[in-house]
Image: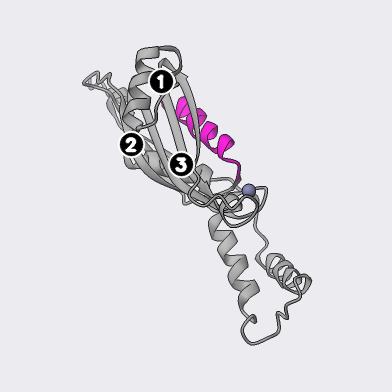
């Protein structure tokens, strides 16, 4: 009799963003209306295709790519921090619908399963391609990894520049907003927490 040790197989989970349906035609009409409201003529030669381009640009910025979340058994019992630094983050602030962009540092202390490293970037994208606030984005990435990977700890730091702060308002060009979310040992153990923050290059307080 053959025993199939399924616990040693990689496990793949197909992940889709589950965003609300985007009505491109309605978005185009709305952009044309916005141009009129701003005193511009959307029928002019230069602006004729702008509503369509803007509608498609927003649709793309609000739609994460689907991916397979593949996890593997942690056969070697690896129990040190796994950290992916400087994952690009591109998102849209929900208050102004202007971009914010920067980097995420995502780390976890493995439990029974480990994850293909490129998947950490896909999890960031899964939540970044949305109308967001940086605090919620940070927490969603940490919560999602906690729920799907069940690591001993997870930590997420995002450093981002918000165009709503640099192009308008205070016009604080170059100012970065830093947010963090921690679970498990990275939250509870001062040593693990310190190690995580020092590896991300953020000074822990
Ligand atoms: Zn904003």
Q: Are marks 1 and 2 in contact (CB under 8 Å)?
A: no
- The residue at which mark 2 appears reads as 84
Mark 1–mark 2 distance (CA, rounded to whole Å): 14 Å
Mark 3–mark 2 distance (CA, rounded to whole Å): 11 Å
Q: Mark 2, residues whose alpha carbon is within 10 Å: few (<14), some, or many (≥20)? A: some
Range of the magenta residues? 132-150
Where residue 190 is drawn, which disc sits there?
none
Q: Is residue 97 above or below residue 87?
A: below
Mark 3–mark 1 distance (CA, rounded to whole Å): 17 Å
Where residue 124 is drawn, which disc sits there?
3
Q: Earlier in the sequence, mark 1 or mark 2?
A: 2
In the displayed structure, does residue 166 sit left or right of residue 22?
Answer: left
In the displayed structure, does residue 9 sit left or right of residue 150?
Answer: left
Magenta span: predominant SS is helix
Q: Mark 3, residues whose alpha carbon is within 10 Å: few (<14), some, or many (≥20)? A: many
Q: Earlier in the sequence, mark 3 or mark 2?
A: 2
Q: Are marks 3 and 2 in contact (CB under 8 Å)?
A: no
Q: Is residue 99 above or below residue 138?
A: below
Instruction: Say if the magenta span includes residue 52.
Output: no
Foreground pick, 192 / 4:
192
Helix, strand or loop under label 1: strand
> Could you tell me which quadrant the C terminus lies in?
top left
Q: Earlier in the sequence, mark 3 or mark 1?
A: 3
Q: Is mark 2 within 8 Å of ligand 1?
A: no
Q: Give the x, y percent position of residue 104.
A: 42, 40
> Could you tell me which quadrant the N terminus lies in?
top left
- The residue at which mark 1 appears reads as 153
Helix, strand or loop under label 2: strand
């Amino acid at each position: 009799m053959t025993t199939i040790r399924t616990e040693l197989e990689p496990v793949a989970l197909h992940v889709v963003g589950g965003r609300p349906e985007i009505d491109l035609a309605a978005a185009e009409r709305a952009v044309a209306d916005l141009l009129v409201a701003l005193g511009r003529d959307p029928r002019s030669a230069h602006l004729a295709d702008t509503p369509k381009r803007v509608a498609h640009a927003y649709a793309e910025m609000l739609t994460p790519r689907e991916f397979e979340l593949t996890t593997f058994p942690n056969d070697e019992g690896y129990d040190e921090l796994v950290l992916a630094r400087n994952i690009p983050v591109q998102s849209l602030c929900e208050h102004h619908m202007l971009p914010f962009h920067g980097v995420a540092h995502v780390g976890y202390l493995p439990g029974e399963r480990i994850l293909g490293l490129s998947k950490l970037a896909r999890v960031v994208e899964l939540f970044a391609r949305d109308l967001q606030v940086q605090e919620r984005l940070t927490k969603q990435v940490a919560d999602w990894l906690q729920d799907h990977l069940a690591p001993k700890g997870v930590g997420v730091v995002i450093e981002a520049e918000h165009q709503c702060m640099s192009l308008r308002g205070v016009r604080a060009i170059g100012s970065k907003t830093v947010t963090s979310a921690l679970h498990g040992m990275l939250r509870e153990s001062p040593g693990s927490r310190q190690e995580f923050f020092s590896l991300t290059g953020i000074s822990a307080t």
